[in-house]
Each structure stands twice: as C-alpha cells, then as structure tokens.
Amino acid sequence: MKLLFASFVLMAPLVMAHPGSHERIGQLDEQIAARPGDGSLLLRRASEHIVHGDWESAEDDLAAVETAGDSAATQLL
C-alpha cells in the first residue's frame, strides 16, 4: 500500500485538478455506495482525492481497499 500511495504522491504535482474532478468524485461516491466491496472504485477515488491534495481522504480510501476484500485491487497496493 505504501508503494502505491508514494506513486500517487509523486504523480500528483504533474496533474492539475480540473472542474470535472469534483463530479467524478461524486459519481464514484455513488458507485461505491452501491458496490462497497469494489476496491477498484476505491482506488480510482483515492486517485481523484490526490489530484485535489486531499491526502487524508486518499489514505482512507487506500486503507479501505485493504479491508474491502477485493483481492484484485489489493494486489495493486
């Protein structure tokens, strides 16, 4: 997990947030509510949080991937 988080941190300065990011986070919130065990959605939302500099929310999402039980997404950590 630390390696994935570090890679997000290193990429963040290269990516500029744009207006659609807030909408994507909202869409991901809805999708995660419907499929809370889908680690790939949590990873995508973590990425969006990092783009916005919301490190705490990103870390929460990455930690949730580990507890979600989605083995495919957990392997990416």
Image (cartoon, rainbow, N blue to C red):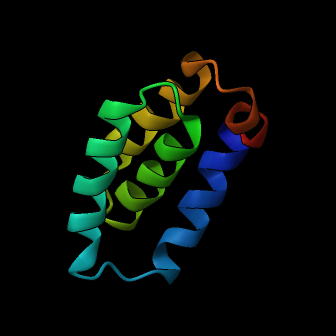
Q: Is residue 33 above or below residue 12?
A: above
Identify the residue at image location x=45%, y=49%.
46
Placement of the C terminus among the 4 image quadrants: top right
x and y percentages locating residue 67 in the rendered image: 56, 16
Residue 50 point in image, percent of width and height: 41, 58
Whether 1 is drawn above or below 40: the answer is above
Rendered position, 39 above or below 5: above
Residue 21 % position (x, y): 29, 70
| 54 relative position to 66: left or right | left
Looking at the picture, does residue 1 appear above or below residue 49?
A: above
Farthest residue to the front: give it: 34
Which image quadrant for residue 27? bottom left
* Image quadrant occupied by the N terminus: top right
Q: Which image quadrant is residue 66 in?
A: top right
In the image, residue 7 lies at what x, y percent? 66, 58
Residue drawn where x is 38% and y is 83% of the image: 16
What is the number of callouts on the image? Answer: 0
The residue shown at (39%, 60%) is 48
